[in-house]
Image (cartoon, helix red, strand yellow):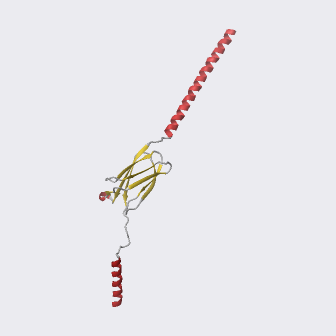
């Protein structure tokens, strides 16, 4: 009887030891998978190349605009980037994946561009800037005086 109880006790100890090893191994796998998912969900320092092409005109008549400033300001990150278009009207900025940026493009005598977007991959944007047209005729001071004199003269002669 003592022999049977000592065998049962030894089997129980072995069973508890194996069970403890299985629990410890599973705990290690869970901890490792949590660390991996945390690293994958927060990619810090990964940047996409965002290409901006800036032109004037439409269709085949469009020409690249050079030295146009492009500003990208992070909406949900402290990262921002600025650059100037090259001779082809192209500017490439490195922006963080998964972050939202507000982009502004301003060229003299052209309507401004302002938009928000989320960086999901290397992306390209093309803009055909519209020239601001002046609807007010520009006259010199002398032209205005001559125009008034002519109007008065016509009024007197009538």
Residue at horizontal 37 percent and vertical 56 percent from the top? 68
Left or right? Give the position of 96 relative to 11: left
Residue at horizontal 33 percent and vertical 59 percent from the top? 58
Which residue is most to the left?
Answer: 60
Which residue is most to the front?
Answer: 141
**As rendered, which of 86 and 124 lies closer to the eye?**
86
Residue at horizontal 66 percent and vertical 12 percent from the top? 6
Quarter of the rendering containing residue 56:
bottom left
Q: Position of residue 16 (x, y in %)?
A: 63, 20
Q: Position of residue 63 (x, y in %)?
A: 31, 57
Residue at horizontal 36 percent and vertical 82 percent from the top? 148
Which residue is most to the bottom?
Answer: 157
Which residue is most to the right?
Answer: 1
* Picture quarter with the N terminus: top right
Vertical position of residue 94 compared to residue 140: above or below: above
Q: Position of residue 17 (x, y in %)?
A: 61, 20
Would you say residue 83 is visible in this rendering? yes
**As rendered, which of 130 and 58 lies closer to the eye?**
130
**As rendered, which of 60 and 105 lies closer to the eye?**
105
Quarter of the rendering containing residue 107:
bottom left
**As rendered, which of 118 and 153 lies closer to the eye?**
153
* Picture quarter with the C terminus: bottom left
Number of marks present in the image shown: 0
Would you say residue 158 is visible in this rendering? no
């Amino acid at each position: 009887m003592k022999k049977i109880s000592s065998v049962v006790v030894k089997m129980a100890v072995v069973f508890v030891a194996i069970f403890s090893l299985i629990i410890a191994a599973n705990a290690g796998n869970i901890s490792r998978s949590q660390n991996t998912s945390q690293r994958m969900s927060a990619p810090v320092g990964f940047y996409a190349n965002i290409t901006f092409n800036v032109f004037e005109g439409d269709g085949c008549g469009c020409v690249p605009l050079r030295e146009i400033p492009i500003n990208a300001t992070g909406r949900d990150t402290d990262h921002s980037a600025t650059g100037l278009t090259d001779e082809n009207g192209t500017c490439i900025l490195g922006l963080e994946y998964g972050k939202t940026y507000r982009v502004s493009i301003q060229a003299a005598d052209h309507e401004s561009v302002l938009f928000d977007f989320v960086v999901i991959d290397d992306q390209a944007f093309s803009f055909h800037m519209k020239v601001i047209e002046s609807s007010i005729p520009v006259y010199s001071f002398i032209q205005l005086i001559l125009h008034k004199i002519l109007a008065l003269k016509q009024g007197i002669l009538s």
